[in-house]
Image (cartoon, rainbow, N blue to C red):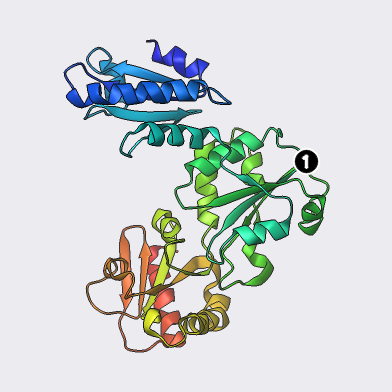
Amino acid sequence: MNFTRFEEDHQLFMFVFYVDWCTHCKEMMPIYEIAAKILKRSENPVILAKIDGMTQNQLVNRFDVKIYPKFFIRNKGRIIPFEERPTTKTLVDAVLKEARPAYRPVSNLKELDAERNVDQAVLLALTNSLTHPLMDLFDQSIRYADSGLKAFVSKDPDARKYFNVTDREFAVFLLQAQRFSLGPSTTLDITQIYGKPGAQPKEVSDEVLKRQPPLVGAYNQLTLRMYNSVRDMVLCVIPQSFSISTEPVRAMNKIADQLKQHILPRIKDQIHWILIDDLNYPKVVESYSDSDFMVGCRLNNETFTMPGDKLDMNEIEVFARKTLLKSGF
């Protein structure tokens, strides 16, 4: 097959590398062919292709194929390795997920609030039409995000009034996590990222990720992907055994309030603070240091820790300033 021509003709498709001597490939092919028939009959038909690994060496090298069979999905230039156990259902579900919009339409802001969690950041696009030229960039940029980011779209006139964008055909807002909300500053108008000439989905996704973490947040199952994806940003964790506290939420809020009152006015947005339960996420805490510490900071692969046995905001401020100097900020 002429793969280059195939890419030009089909925006979305799945393909599998196989070789004749592969027993597992022979076992998988009937499953793959059934999935192909199902997807061909779907509302928006999707093609499934097969690539012979013995004759297509250039493609084998391009996609770094080491084992057979190896499945991939291509969606408008984005390549997604299929890592699940291949069954008819998992193959079909994976392709249909890519075929669906990466965002959810919402009728109003009340519906949006019901869909989000206090620890989650969300993207909200406000537009007059789902066919606006920037909607495809919005959709594709979400797919590049590896941070658990949820995205919504609304055509609600009241929502446009609330965000004061009635004069715009398209606007995008990043609503940061609400757990330790700092007020209106946690709602960011990031429309300009999408409006840059020649903006590419991966570049847009990276820019959105930089703005995603709140100044004070919590590390948990909803936020770990976000914090693990962040680069070129100083992240400082404060580990505490919140889960055995008589009032865990109150204990976290107390520290968050202290940071907002004493640290943020001086350090501002140069550091993002993360409250983490050291009993639930010991490996994350240990990645900063094997020894006990009160505060641990990281910039990419470089770590700094503050020893001690109690949280003192004055000491934390001094440590934070020293960390910024060492980090080159």
Asked if residue 41 lies left or right of residue 89, the reply is right
Residue 281 vs 311, above or below: the answer is above
Quarter of the N terminus within the rendering: top left
Residue 250 location, x and y as percent?
51, 84
Q: What residue is rendered at 68% in x and 67% in y? A: 184
Say if residue 159 shows up in the picture: yes
Residue 203 location, x and y as percent?
51, 41
Sort mark 1 into few (<14), some (14-19) or many (20+) by Cα contacts within 10 Å.
some
- For label 1, the SS is loop
Query: Which residue occupies the foreground of this view, 144 or 116?
Result: 116
Q: What residue is rendered at 65% in x and 37% in y? A: 135
Query: Which residue occupies the foreground of this view, 38 or 48?
Result: 38
Residue 293 location, x and y as percent?
30, 79
Question: Residue 324's image quarter?
Answer: bottom left
Asked if residue 26 lies left or right of residue 36, the reply is left
Say if residue 80 shows up in the picture: no
Q: What residue is rendered at 59% in x and 49% in y? A: 151
Residue 269 vs 193, above or below: the answer is below
Question: Residue 197's image quarter?
Answer: top right
Residue assigned mark 1 = 128
Residue 301 vs 286, above or below: the answer is above
Residue 276 location, x and y as percent?
40, 73
Asked if residue 67 lies left or right of residue 329, the reply is left
Q: Amino acid at mark 1?
A: Asn
Quarter of the C terminus within the rendering: bottom left
